[in-house]
């Protein structure tokens, strides 16, 4: 068992969520699951299925059910803030990011090794050419200083032209990890990456909020490095 504070964001994909939670069993003793308020009856039914999955899991699950629909950006940022109120670190998994063998060991070792390195502000299990990837990652309480730079600030940064086009279309306030990527860029920080990809992203099937065929997710896919 690894001594990690793991949070899973779950909303409307019970099959995806089941795979993620199952991958945590036998690796960590507890996880926190954050569930946004359902927008409709179909999502409510999916959430009931997820609660059944939680009740039969061998992990001790702290389920946080929101009383209103925060939306993706607010839900992610609020969950991170909540975890870091009482923990010195947190590991975040979205409900389509299935940990592969070696994920938890990599997270525990990296969080210890780089905790005093101010240039490393995140640990990422998916290898990318850019400085951050949100598919299975971790950060420290002392290093989480999230900002949301304005488009004018971002234009002054030396960033990939395709990413700048995405920002002009979506804005860093619509995709939370863009804000963190820009914050890292602003302060000259980066992530520590695994030497091989340790996440199987099963959400590239148009079941999530963002399509993988266009916009930021498409750009992020273009940044993925093979093992």
Image (cartoon, grey):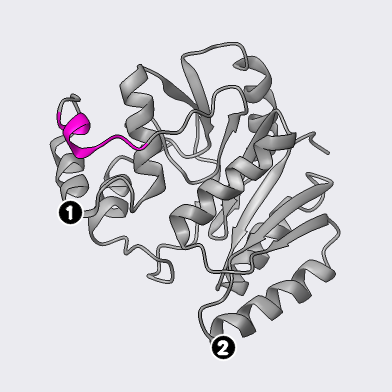
> Residue placed farthest to the bottom in the image?
41
Q: Please give the range of residues in magenta.
A: 148-155
Whole-percent x and y of residue 44? 61, 82
Q: Is residue 72 left or right of residue 225?
A: right
Is residue 128 visible in the rendered structure shown here? no
* Distance between the alpha carbons at the discs numbered 2 and 1: 31 Å
Queried whether the magenta region covers residue 149, the answer comes back as: yes
- Of labels 2 and 1, earlier in sequence is 2
- Identify which residue is drawn at 40% across, 47% down: 176
Residue that badge 1 annotates: 169
Give me the residue at 16% from left, 34% from top: 152
The answer to if 68 sits in the magenta stretch is no
Location of mark 2 (residue) = 41
- The answer to whether the residue labelled 2 contacts the one labelled 1, judged by CB atoms less than 8 Å apart, is no
* Quadrant location, the C terminus: top left
Observer able to see residue 53: yes
- Specify the principal SS of the magenta part: helix
Between 10 and 97, the one nearer to me in the picture: 10
Based on the displayed image, in which of its 4 quarters is residue 84 positioned?
A: top right
Q: Is residue 123 left or right of residue 226?
A: right
Q: Is residue 188 left or right of residue 57?
A: left
Q: Which residue is at a point 36% across and 34% down the rendered structure image?
A: 181
Percent across and percent down for residue 77 are: 52, 46
Element on which disc 1 rests: helix
Image quarter of residue 94: bottom right
x and y percentages locating residue 51 in the rendered image: 74, 73
Label 2: which secondary element:
helix
In the rendered structure, find residue 207 and report the number of the disc placed on it: none
Q: Is residue 34 above or below residue 172?
A: below
Instruction: Name the residue nearer the viewer: 23 or 76.
Output: 76
- Residue at point 25% right, 47% down? 219
């Amino acid at each position: 068992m690894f001594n990690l504070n793991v949070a899973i964001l779950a909303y409307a994909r019970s099959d995806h969520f089941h795979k993620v939670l199952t991958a945590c069993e036998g690796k960590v003793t507890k996880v926190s699951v954050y569930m946004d308020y359902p927008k409709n009856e179909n999502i409510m039914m999916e959430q009931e299925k997820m609660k059944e999955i939680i009740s039969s899991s061998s992990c001790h699950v702290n389920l946080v059910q929101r009383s209103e629909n925060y939306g993706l950006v607010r839900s992610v940022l609020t969950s991170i803030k909540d975890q870091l109120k009482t923990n010195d670190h947190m590991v975040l998994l979205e409900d389509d990011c299935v940990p592969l063998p070696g994920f938890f060991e990599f997270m525990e070792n990296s969080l210890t090794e780089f905790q005093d390195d101010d240039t490393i502000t995140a640990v990422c299990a998916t290898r990318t050419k850019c400085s951050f990837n949100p598919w299975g990652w971790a950060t420290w309480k002392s290093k989480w200083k999230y900002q949301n730079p304005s488009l004018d600030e971002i234009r002054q940064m030396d960033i990939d032209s395709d990413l700048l086009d995405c920002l002009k279309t979506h804005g860093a306030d619509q995709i939370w990890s863009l804000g963190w990527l820009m914050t890292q860029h602003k302060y000259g920080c980066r992530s520590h990456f695994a030497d091989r990809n340790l996440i199987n992203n099963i959400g590239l099937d148009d079941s999530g909020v963002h399509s993988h065929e266009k916009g930021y997710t498409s750009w992020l896919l273009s940044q993925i490095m093979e093992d």
